Amino acid sequence: MPKHVAGKRGTARRRMSGPVASGAGTTKPKEKGPAVERESWWETAVIYQVYVRSFTDGDGDGIGDLAGVRSRLGYLRELGVDAIWFNPWYLSPMADGGYDIVDYHEIEPLFGSIEQAEQLIAEAHALGIRIVLDVVPNHGSDQEPWFGDALTSPSGSPERARYHFRPGRGANGELAPNDWESIFGGPAWTRTNGPEGQPGEWYLHLFAPEQPDYNWDNPEVRAHFDEVLRFWFDRGVDGFRIDSAALLVKEPRLVDLGASDWTRSPGGHPFVDRDGIHDVYRQWRRLADSYTGKRLLVGEVWLPEQPDRFARYLRPDELHAAFNFSLLGCAFEATALREVIETTLDSHVALGPWPTWVLSNHDVVRPVTRYGRCGTAFSMDDRRIGEASDLELGARRARAAALLTLSLPGAVYIYQGEELGLWEVEELPDELLEDPIWRRSGHTDRGRDGCRVPIPWTGQEAPFGFGPDGSTPWLPQPAQWKDFTVEAESADAGSMLELYRAALRLRRLEPAFRTRELRWLPARDGVLVYCRGTDLLVVANLSDQPIDLSRSGEVLLSSAPTQEAKLPVDCAAWLRLPAGRLRSDL
Ligand code: GLC
């Protein structure tokens, strides 16, 4: 959730069954490429993001759940993914889609139980699929016992010291303690009431009021999260995606943003990317590395304009990887894309860790819609929901973008439904919108629900196999999705799903895709051409003319049919170069 950066430019325990062994791969994938020495599984992995609420509903209440996910593991195995990243599945009042967590030791009952989670982990591992969970260290939930204790404890108490409580400004404390704004809109502070209802201190929440920020200067908070990581590592999970990873540490005096000199000094922002964060990740890295098997820590670090600061999270004793969102925001335009790819690769070569590539996730407008608009660049500050989009054009470009992304050195994250070419559902009824952004923005920003509409699997009408027949999904699916179900797309060799399946298969089989090498070859304006390894050529035609591939090698895969060896506009292809031929005639 990038807005903050793009803008600038006591817990009950349940009895659990015992820990399970870590690491996928007890069963070998059927189809394997030639053996290539690989340091760590995540370096070139394809990681599929499951937003549980919208994936598959096993019990018919309209909400996706773990039983549903378990029933689809075969689909993910066949798609060819290496790992699944789950958005938060823990106990939560769902004020922000589960990013307001009450207890990490329980599964949200809407989703299932801890036993089901353990079974799911074991079943995925048996299929060679690893499991990555979300952890949300910046904030908790206002329904958490710790927060309840804080509210009933006096100012200055140890209970309040786990959060950021402050007296208000103004004669009667009626003004917020500082000028920070919530990333979801409105002030970042909410005033509390004392036992007799009299107004009291304020508490900080960089997101919704239901998500109070933790105080990371408090050792109890640090110990709590160490325990949470251990709890799930002990249950065999292979890694964590760290939510809002650059926000945890705050300037101790909580100075006004307006009064700080953050634009001039790196690390000077009062709540983004403070230097003190790195101690937290050094500790987490020690913890992750103390487990057998390779456990991943991947950070949601949105610092698009500060590559040097981004790099600091990837130092050898910190995170193993960080999301690189530059591709996701980039216009569908050759020069801009090339610059993003080059900058990312160059910065990571110097660092060591492999890059990550992301075209979509649960926070952003789906690529088919983005790429069908007049301006194809994307920013979280301006999602432009409802702006006209040519979905046919968008889909053609999204197919090309998929082949570009899947051919780059590093890990690729795929958000559920991206592989089906689903678009943003922009006409959802107001009363069904759940994203807190809708409410907090005073109903001016429709938020992120449009990319979270339940997945269509089978059949001709809703719920399209998302849940049992007759059940009503929590958000309505467009009737046109009958042609975009997994079933329909599996029967169509030209579908987006078949393109993803083929691309993932080739990516797995071709050793060149598991190297870090990428060589640009000269090409005319609007055309991107690069070589992977010695014999794979990737061509993307973003010019206004078809290009002739007849002298460029054998086409292995293309995002649209090539007629008479012509690659149409807004399309991409992977080719095998004839032996010894490392040049392009494009
Ligand atoms: C991250 C999540 C987003 C969530 C926010 C607050 O950015 O991706 O969905 O709303 O954090 O936890």
Image: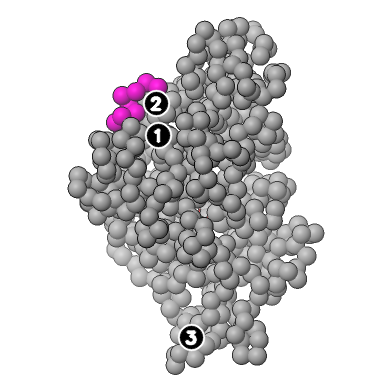
For marks 3 and 1, give the CA distance: 49 Å
Rendered location of residue 15, percent (x, y): 29, 63
Please name the amino acid that badge 2 sits on.
Answer: Ser
Residue matched to label 3: 193
Q: Residues within 10 Å of mark 3 (few under 14, many from 20)?
A: some
Q: What residue is drawn where x is 61% and y is 90%?
A: 172
Residue at image mark 1:
420
- Give the secondary structure at mark 3: strand
Residue at 47% x, 48% y is 362
Secondary structure beneath label 1 = helix
Residue 237 seen anywhere in this rendered image of the structure? no
Gap between marks 2 and 1 measured at Cα: 8 Å
**Residue receiving disc 2:** 495
Question: Could you tell me residue 294's position as x and y percent?
Answer: 49, 42
Which region of the structure is painted magenta?
485-495
Please identify the quarter of the rendering in which residue 430 is found.
bottom left
Q: Secondary structure at mark 2?
A: loop
Q: Earlier in the sequence, mark 2 or mark 3?
A: 3
The residue that appears at 68% across and 34% down in the rendered structure is: 336
Total tally of numbered discs in the picture: 3
Height in image: 399 above or below 385? above
Instruction: Tell me the amino acid under the disc marked 3.
Output: Asn
Left or right: 268 in relation to 301:
right
Q: Which residue is at the front of the view, 461 or 83?
A: 461
